[in-house]
Amino acid sequence: MNAVDYRNQTTIVTGASSGLGEAFARQLAARGSNLVLVARRADRLERLAEELNRTHGVTVTTVARDLGRPDAGRTLRTELETRGIHATGLVNNAGFGTHHAFPDEDPDRLQSMIALNVAALVDLSHAFFAPLTAAGNGVLINTASLLGFQPTPYMSAYGATKAFVLSFTESLWEEARGTGLRVLAISPGAMDSEFFDAAGSQSADYGAKRISPEDVARIALKTVDRRSAPPSVITNGRPLAFASRFLPRRAVVHMMGSLQRRAMNRG
Ligand SMILES: NC(=O)c1ccc[n+]([C@@H]2O[C@H](COP(=O)([O-])OP(=O)(O)OC[C@H]3O[C@@H](n4cnc5c(N)ncnc54)[C@H](OP(=O)(O)O)[C@@H]3O)[C@@H](O)[C@H]2O)c1
């Protein structure tokens, strides 16, 4: 397969009001894709839509929506199709993390996180999988995380949601092989965004140097352009993922626990 031609495509980007989703929206618009931008903060989406339409001449639709509900994908597809919008690409990027010792986690926030990071992502992927496949040259990009490669004490539920996204998306990559739909899980390490504000902690990055959302989006789009694209790509912090592949499980969990405890003491 050759580089994706995004002209005449319509790509949905969730979590487009900041960070990585905003970076995806900018780079997809620059490549000529029409967009559907989804997040809760309408003002930010509208400002971005106006700018991308003015700068790149693409059509940008905004949907101000809390995606944290189990029928998020089905509802969005029905709504868009009623408006005559037929998506050919989907970037499932909306997500957040929490950073506490498990007994201190807010149980409602944990459920909201699982609803968004896991349930909504699956429903969105399912609702759009058939039309994206039918489009012939669509993309499905799901944002996982470097923390999806190993258990993450003190971000235990967040890391587990991202392990789910990684496993789920790599399975879809195999199921989509030969159909023309390109599926990719992206696993950023620490990234400079509002993620750490939402997590209530600036120390959840283990002190690692943060990559920019622009670089992450660039790596992701370059990866799906490849003739033989892999099911997933780690954008930064690869040694951590490799360590967890080769070290005994017990050593990996201990290592992650002490990294996190050190980070929490710093923060
Ligand atoms: N930053 C990191 O170090 C890092 C590393 C690996 C993976 N990630 C992943 O990267 C993705 C993007 O995060 P980011 O780092 O760019 O953080 P961010 O700047 O906080 O962006 C998160 C986005 O998700 C949206 N969102 C949150 N809750 C939502 C909800 N209930 N319904 C709809 N949209 C919602 C937010 O928009 P509204 O608030 O307007 O709804 C925002 O646009 C996430 O999946 C995150 O887990 C981040």
Image (spheres, grey):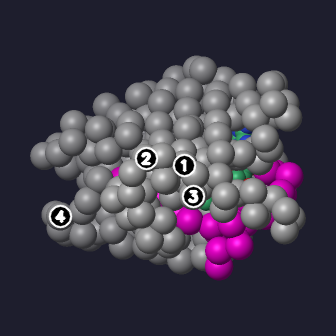
**Circle on res. 43:** none
Q: Which secondary structure, mark 2?
A: helix
Closer to the camera, 162 or 173?
Answer: 162
Question: CB of mark 3 within 8 Å of CB of mark 1?
Answer: yes
Residue extent of the magenta highlight: 184-209
Give the class, few, some or many, for how many residues have Cα within 10 Å of label 4's Cα (few <14, many ≥20).
few
**Residue for badge 1:** 253
Question: CB of mark 1 within 8 Å of CB of mark 2?
Answer: yes
Q: Disc 1 vs disc 4: which is toward the camera?
A: 1
Image: 200 above or below 236:
above
**Residue for badge 3:** 255
Residue 41, given in percent of the width and then of the height, sits at 81, 48
Name which quarter of the figure residue 68 lies in.
top right
Q: Does residue 226 appear in this view?
A: yes
**Circle on res. 249:** 2
Give the number of callouts.
Answer: 4
